[in-house]
Image: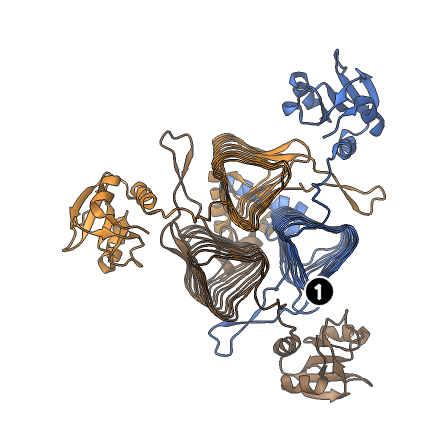
Chain colours: A orange, B blue, C brown
Amino acid sequence: MNTINIKELSELVNGELIGDTSLLITGPEQLERAQSSHISFIGNRKYIKLWNSSKAMAAIINDNIDLDPEEGQALIRVKNADLAMVKILEAFDPGQPQLESGIHATATIHETAKIGSNCVIGAGCYVGKDVVLGDNVFLYPNVTILDETSIGNNTTIWSGTVIRERTEIGSYCIFHSNVSIGSDGFGYRPSDDGRGLVKIPQIGNVVIGHQVEIGANSCVDRGKFSSTVIGDGCKIDNLVQIGHNSVMGRSCIMAGGSGLAGSVTLGDGVIIGGSASIKDHTTVHSGATVGGGSGVMSDVAAGKTVLGYPACDSKDMLKQWIALRNLAKN
Amino acid sequence: MNTINIKELSELVNGELIGDTSLLITGPEQLERAQSSHISFIGNRKYIKLWNSSKAMAAIINDNIDLDPEEGQALIRVKNADLAMVKILEAFDPGQPQLESGIHATATIHETAKIGSNCVIGAGCYVGKDVVLGDNVFLYPNVTILDETSIGNNTTIWSGTVIRERTEIGSYCIFHSNVSIGSDGFGYRPSDDGRGLVKIPQIGNVVIGHQVEIGANSCVDRGKFSSTVIGDGCKIDNLVQIGHNSVMGRSCIMAGGSGLAGSVTLGDGVIIGGSASIKDHTTVHSGATVGGGSGVMSDVAAGKTVLGYPACDSKDMLKQWIALRNLAKN
Amino acid sequence: MNTINIKELSELVNGELIGDTSLLITGPEQLERAQSSHISFIGNRKYIKLWNSSKAMAAIINDNIDLDPEEGQALIRVKNADLAMVKILEAFDPGQPQLESGIHATATIHETAKIGSNCVIGAGCYVGKDVVLGDNVFLYPNVTILDETSIGNNTTIWSGTVIRERTEIGSYCIFHSNVSIGSDGFGYRPSDDGRGLVKIPQIGNVVIGHQVEIGANSCVDRGKFSSTVIGDGCKIDNLVQIGHNSVMGRSCIMAGGSGLAGSVTLGDGVIIGGSASIKDHTTVHSGATVGGGSGVMSDVAAGKTVLGYPACDSKDMLKQWIALRNLAKN
């Protein structure tokens, strides 16, 4: 990481700098683990104790906390230490690893694929027939993109990720490691003799908007027919399952380990907590929130917060939990 | 996709064609997203409204729904629109992406591996020592098959999947992207000084029958000794965990995010709902169903349906949920 | 597998050998599946029936079980058949598959990477800029290690695994297939116009101790800043999620499908059951146990066992489950 003067950092976060204005900062660090050249964060009075025992000489501090720097220390007072932290992280961001620019000698690119300008394609990547990559697309080593997929400008795909045929991906997306896009939806019918299962062809695809981020080892299945759709700005964490023909609106959040069964519809700005699951063919309307660990079995109205298994209004679920605790005490 | 005359489609689904018999259809699509050349599905009266506003000029319709085609439209009346849909999907199925036939120049095949006729092995694949592939095995790019594994005829393995040593796989199987087969089971013993954990060797393997499908990013661990077994015709969704020495009968279904801890036994035709988990050393007997999100902690009798956490008879669990809801209201 | 005389096996497990002392054993097997040259295990009286119908001619048996070998059979009496089993597994362990030693011709190693002695790097691997591998590091085919990562001696990484930049990994670790280490933590802030989400840079890293094992398709996210930390001797099963800035002590166990949201702290020797989830910013103190399927929403005291969703003391939760069952019966 680079080194930045404490004054510059103070200006960056629009703060009031008090104490030693000559400090050179090498990066942000937690109070417990900081060395003297690090800057840390005091967003709450309870961290003052950690600050007193920390090796850090500099901190961003909420301006409602009463604390003065000692000799050699510097404090940057701000309205909101959490927001200031984001600016500090941006300042010290080393950026993503660079590869030798261009297409690595060990990558396999089908002769019909169209590659935009300034693309980087790492070692061992495969780019199939009639794939179209926009400009500045970055494929880390060992990514697989199958036939007729299109990817917009400035999208980054990390190693191990597999994008199957006919997927459509927008611009400024980030796909983390070992993601699986466009695998067959899970659909079978009983065999004619009633003794087994016959696969229903899954001939649809996946359509993903702009600025979508998908976490490591998550899966988005292709539609049975038509498309599985992820709207602009959706952010999806690790190990998330999105079943075939589900449709997500804009800027939805799905936390780690959560899942949509088939044909689920999410409105805009829906938040799904970690490890929560949504039953097939249900709709969670815009602005609704599903609490962590919940199992949603019926539609959720716009703006509502649901919780529990089976999920219901979160206040009602909390009452149920309290009632059960009291019942067991008797 | 190809183009098919509406008459042909009507014959295919054994339907009654009314309206414009000259339409050329380019594929199936949902009513909301259809263009004029698409065929859609009306399996329920509630879709008539969508049909009226759809651009689709053709639909398969259940014969108990009273609707007539307007000028230029065609309807195919059938007993069961859902079953007819499967035939339509099969008719328009573009098939899986083809690679240049044979073994790609960048694949690494151990000199002792035996490769059947008409196999396709994509770029960046690794096929290890003494591996045996049957005929028509299809490995997409960046698949890894380790030593002494055998794979039956007509099995397809998608990119990123890893099959570890000594796995036995049948014919007509499909393994989706980033699947992990044969990783070590999860077994440790306390170290002699009682302060740590020592790995128990996992020297068994995985044995998978015919016509088994395993979803993206799912895992099947090898046996501690003996085998983890998946019976013929089992269908496993994405992000499923199958612990060491579990044994599944024929034609079981495991939906997304579900899991078997170690040494679980499933009979034939067992259905495990999404995100459900089965405790180690329990048995779910033939024909039983485990509801989505359930946590099964004891054996389940044949044909029974269980639900909830901890799982019990589904009717009893529904009663518990209602009783708790009522309790909280008082 | 190799063949071992029954006498040798008896000495190995410190047992008392009775019956035919000349048997040659080809490996351990379950009673139901054993052939005549296999050795099996009778740790409980209920297995005597299986032994009577088994083809196995040899078994390890707990010395409190009254059973005599018939003609041609051999029994090894021990105090604890389960512990003896571990020694038998070690004796027959065929070891991990070997690759041609050294660096495969199709691997890509950046010219600045430092590779220790006796490393094996399989086909299609990528080792990035300034990566440092210790001695005897074993990378199976198609592993990706990005820039500035360091890996200690004798660590094994299975195929498909991706280790992102600046990760620090100790000695004698095992990473199974398709693991994702160091992906971005899941952090966003509302955009200034309030209509979308802006990514918070995740500039920290992952630090993993010695003798850590991580299961297939599991994920460990990098810190927002500072590090996500996994202590020495932790054992992590398949499909586990470890969120950014979580910190695990020594010798913790996380079973399949479990997860830590962001900034979770585990003490030493914590056990997390399968499919259990821990809320962000909570602490599970040393020696605590979280039951399978639980959802932990608040701190857990040292040595305590919690269970359920929302998790509480396991005895209280069992009381709640019983109370609810009784309530529903009325």
Residue lying furthest left in this view? Answer: A71
Which image quadrant: the N terminus of chain B? top right
- Against B297, residue B196 (above or below) is below
Q: Secondary structure at mark 1?
A: loop
In front here: C152 or A115? A115
Whether residue A76 is visible here, answered yes or no, is: yes
- In-image side of C131 versus C158 (left or right): left
Whether residue B272 is visible here, answered yes or no, is: no
Q: Which residue is mark 1?
A: B148
**Residue found 77% across the figure and 78% down from its top:** C37
Q: How many marks?
A: 1
Residue C166 sits in quarter: bottom left
- In-image side of B292 versus A120 (left or right): right
In front here: B210 or C318? B210
Residue type of the residue flagged with mark 1: Glu
- Against B290, residue C190 (above or below) is above
Image location (x, y in percent) of residue B295: 61, 53
Q: Residues within 10 Å of mark 1 (few under 14, many from 20)?
A: many
Image location (x, y in percent) of residue A45: 25, 50
Image location (x, y in percent) of residue A22: 17, 50
- In-image side of A67 versus A92 (left or right): left
Residue lying furthest top in this view? Answer: B71
- Against C252, residue C322 (above or below) is above
Image location (x, y in percent) of residue A148: 63, 36
Q: Chain of mark 1?
A: B
**Residue found 16% across the figure and 48% down from its top:** A21
